[in-house]
Image (spheres, rainbow, N blue to C red):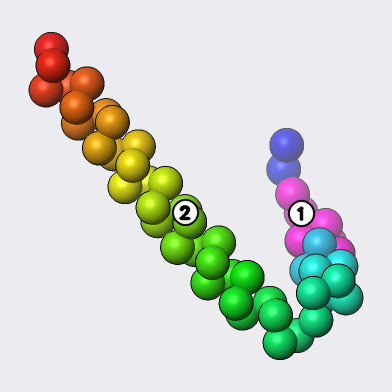
Amino acid sequence: MNIGTGELLLIAFAALLIFGPKKLPELGKALGSSLKEFKQATKGIIEDTDSNK
């Protein structure tokens, strides 16, 4: 499932039309912080399972 440049531009254009230019930075920041929290949570789970062995 490779996403090419054309598809990426189409998705970005659609997001710009749907959410508007003022809302996109806020959405990007929220997505980034959500991914950061998810990584920390999964890292904690992996460390817990490794320490139980």
On the rendered structure, is 9 left or right of 35? right
Q: Which mark is residue 4?
A: 1
Q: On the image, which quarter does residue 10 sit in? A: bottom right
Q: Which residue is mark 2?
A: 35
Q: On the image, which quarter does residue 41 sit in? A: top left
Residue 16, x across and y down, in percent: 81, 76
Magenta region, main secondary structure? helix
Residue 48, x across and y down, in percent: 19, 27
Q: Amino acid at mark 1?
A: Gly
User: Which one is nearer the viewer's eye here, 50 or 23?
Assistant: 23
Q: Amino acid at mark 2?
A: Leu
Mark 2 lies on a secondary structure that is helix
Q: Quadrant of the C terminus?
A: top left
In the image, what residue occupies the spot 61% across and 79% down?
25
On the rendered structure, is 46 left or right of 53? right
Q: Earlier in the sequence, mark 1 or mark 2?
A: 1
How far apart marks 1 and 2 lie (CA) works out to: 22 Å
User: Which one is nearer the viewer's eye here, 16 or 3?
Assistant: 16
Q: Is residue 12 above or below residue 44?
A: below
For the residues carrying marks 1 and 2, which lies nearer the camera in this image?
2
Q: Which mark is residue 16?
A: none
Q: Residue furthest top?
A: 53
In the image, what residue occupies the spot 81% across and 62% down?
11
Q: On the image, which quarter does residue 45 sit in? A: top left
Q: Is residue 29 above or below residue 40?
A: below
| Residue 6 included in the magenta stretch of the image | yes
Number of labels in the image equals 2
Whether residue 41 appears in this view of the structure is yes
Magenta stretch bounds: 3-10
Q: Quadrant of the N terminus?
A: top right
Mark 1 lies on a secondary structure that is loop
Residue 14, x across and y down, in percent: 86, 67
